[in-house]
Every structure is written in C-alpha cells, then in structure tokens.
Amino acid sequence: MGSSRRVLRDVREQLVNGRGFVLLRGVPVDEMSERQCEAAALGLAGHVGRIVPQGPDGAPLMHVRDVGADPARATTRSYQHSGRLGYHSDPSDAVALLCVRPAEAGGLSSIVSSVAVHNEIARTRPDLAEVLYQPWWHDRRTGDGPDSFYLKPLCTPRPGGGVSIAYGPDYLR
C-alpha cells in the first residue's frame, strides 16, 4: 500500500507542480473487468482532484471508442469515431485516459500545453491573443437547432491568475 500511496502522491505532484502530465504504465488491465478498469480510472482521478461530470449525460467518465458514428453528423462527438482527433482542450484541470484495448492501427496520442500555446501567442502576437478572449461560437453537438450553439471565449482569465482554455476544432467549425 505504501508504494501505491507514493505513486499517487508523485502523480499529483507532477500534475500540480511539475510538468503537468504523467504517463503511468503497467496498470494490469488484462486482469480487470471493464467495471474494475472504470473503478481504477475514477479512483486515480478522485485522488488527483474532483471528478467533473462528462458528456451530455453527466456520467463520471466517458468511453473513447469507435461506435461507427459519422463525424459529419451534427450530434457526433469526437470520442465516438475512429477519425483523427485534433488538438483540443478538455474543460477541466486534469484529464486521464486509461488504455484498455489499444487500437490495431493508429491511436497514437500526443499532448501539448494549451497554456504554453496561449503564452507564446500572447508573447509573439498580442493582437491575436486579444481575439482569444472574444466570444466564439461553440457547438454542443446536440443537433442543428439554435440550442446547439452558444457563445464563449476560447480563453477566460481564472480567479487568482492563470487562464482557462476551451478549444476543440470539432466544436468550433
């Protein structure tokens, strides 16, 4: 148990005060049921922070899997198809992914700090940084009706400092 506590403490430290991301390997998903994998993911997330409801149903977690959804449909979400998923930011302080069954092909992931991108734009092009704080149309992906769309800046100042970033190309196009 001491080793697990140390790992969880180190994960939290790296996320909050370190480089901002952690890659954990060796979670024994082959020995676990889907429900146990969910519990493991939620347990880690609960240790790191407060779990935020996900998706239209407000579930505590979402499964990222190809369900054959057409990316061109107005109600398809990015996690429901096998198409390429561009860089985006999720609306939370931390995001966790637990890979249970790797894709036969593709499925590679890379990350970038949205705050670092913001800061570089502000440093090199302050005129463009101002545009990030203006309202942009976002699509909730609930259909083509007027309730599917709302205005929100890409960047919002956070109380006490910092910036919150809401960027998802699929939801802005």
Image (tube, grey):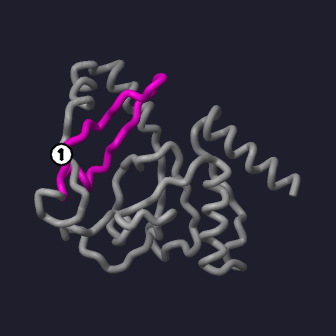
Q: Position of residue 20 (x, y in %)?
A: 57, 39
Q: Is residue 162 magenta?
A: yes
Q: Is residue 67 above or below residue 98?
A: below
Q: Is residue 75 left or right of residue 63?
A: left
Badge 1 marks a residue whose secondary structure is strand
Q: Residues within 10 Å of mark 1 (few under 14, many from 20)?
A: some
Residue that mark 1 sits on: 137
Q: Is residue 128 above or below residue 55?
A: above
The residue at 60%/78% (across/down) is: 34
Q: Is residue 78 above or below residue 149?
A: below
Stretch in magenta: 148-173
Q: Is residue 121 left or right of residue 65?
A: left
Q: Is residue 75 magenta?
A: no
The residue at 81%/51% (across/down) is: 5
The residue at 19%/70% (across/down) is: 73
Which of the 4 image quadrants contains residue 27?
A: bottom right
